[in-house]
Image: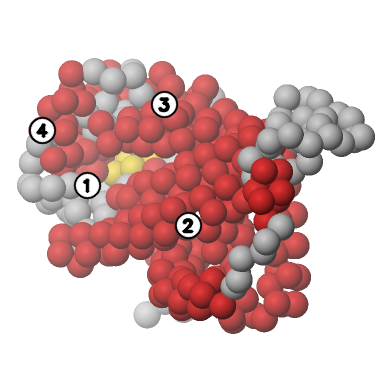
Amino acid sequence: MSKHPDPAARAKRRWRSMLWTILAIVFLAVALPSASYLFAQTGAGEQQRTFSERSETNPRSDMWRDGRRGEGGFTTQTGPYVTNQMMTNVGENYRQLRTGPLMTAGGWLLAIAFFAVLAFYLVSGQKKIEGGRSGQTVVRWKAYERALHWITAACFIILAITGLSLLFGRAVLIPIFGHQGFAAYAELAYWAHNVVGPVFSVGVLLMIVLFIKHNIPNRTDLEWFKKGGGIIGNKHPSAGKMNGGEKVWFWLGLVVLGLAVIITGFIALFPNWGFQTREIMSWSLLIHASAAIAWIAFFLGHAYIGTLGTEGALEGMTRGRVDTAWAKQHHDLWYEEVLAAGEKPVSEDQLKEREKQGAPGGAPAGQQGS
């Protein structure tokens, strides 16, 4: 037996290790905080009821109620949003929505999404390449497309971890780390979230511009959905470079939820633009968190199908090339276009020979494929 393992086997083990690491991070960021919060909130609610029962009515509270409703009053403070307003209830309304419906519904959504994906995998298993691999590959994604995808994906994971830990931190992390430990982590998480956010925003916008041409809906997508997308059942519906599911991820994930997160994030991150009232800031933060939670839940399905759920799918974003058997099974119309454009499938031996000759990505000099 050779002392040096096959390079392809080493690469496969390396990407498998990276995949499990990402899945572990997503599990810790999504499943544990949201599930822990759902259990922790019961005790917190009981404590709040006990405190309320002990409280007595303040005879002078009418003045403060009027102030919180914005009725009457005079102040010497000047400014576009605070003149003659002694007190506002916006912050309290925001707090109640954030710690109530948002955290409860968000926690349940993330937990349900995670365990639904896990259950689907345990029941259905991985979608294999029927008939096995051909040993011939074609280019699916270019190097700059893969770099943009992985940079944006890494930013997404960092933002998901920091965002969820800040949202659920008081209920979940303080009992684990203590107040001082959580305060130190929260400061770091807040800084990382605000620094990585703009980088992620640029990545999402570039992906929208770069990939929109592949995501225009057509009639083929309807047939793809009717046949279960090749994930449910044993049918293999036709698809172009992007199938119907990938187009839903593009339009609902990147465009709708992505732009909602980006716009509200910049409103909250740069409050000195001159139009952010307290109401606008509060609603921006609520929309930002709600859209982000929905996006993370949606991402779990996207990540599963592109990794564990479908054999050979991840290789397109790691190596840039996919097996022709995978291409025929999942993206037959795109594969026909590739062949019609003049690209010829090559074997692993041919790729190694090209790499020895110094061609980037195993492609002939001057040719990078589509």
Assess whether mark 4 and mark 1 are in contact (beta carbons under 8 angstroms): no
Depicted 162 relative to depicted 292: above or below: below
Q: Which residue is mark 1?
A: 134
SS category of the residue bearing label 4: helix
96 is higher (above) or lower (below) than 294: below
Label 2 or label 3, whichever lies nearer to me, is 2
Q: Where does residue 345 sit, x and y in percent of width and height?
A: 31, 35
Q: Residue at x 41, y 69 (%)?
A: 38
Q: Which residue is found at the position 19% from the left and 54% from the top? A: 127
Which is in the foreground here, disc 4 or disc 3?
4
Residue 226 shows which numbered tag?
4
Q: Quadrant of residue 121?
A: bottom left
Mark 3 vs mark 1: give the one in front: 3
Per the model, the C-alpha gap separating discs 4 and 2 is: 39 Å
Q: Percent from the top left, x then y, of residue 50? A: 51, 78
Q: What element does badge 1 sit on?
A: loop
Q: CA distance from mark 2 to mark 1?
A: 54 Å
Q: Amino acid at mark 3?
A: Ser
Q: Of label 4 and label 2, which has the lower sequence position?
A: 2
State which tag comes first along the sequence, 1 or 4.
1
Q: Are marks 4 and 3 in contact (CB under 8 Å)?
A: no
* Residue 100 circle label: 2
Q: Position of residue 215 (x, y in %)?
A: 36, 24
Q: Nearer the viewer, residue 206 or 334?
A: 206
Residue 330 appears left or right of 42: left
Which residue is under mark 3? 370
Q: The disc labelled 4 sits on which kind of residue? A: Lys
Proximity of marks 4 and 2: CB atoms separated by less than 8 Å? no
**Local crowd at mark 2 within 10 Å, few (<14), some, or many (≥20)?**
few
Of residues 240 and 215, the one drawn nearer to the viewer in this rendering: 215
- State which tag comes first along the sequence, 2 or 1: 2
Q: Residue at x 44, y 44 (%)?
A: 295
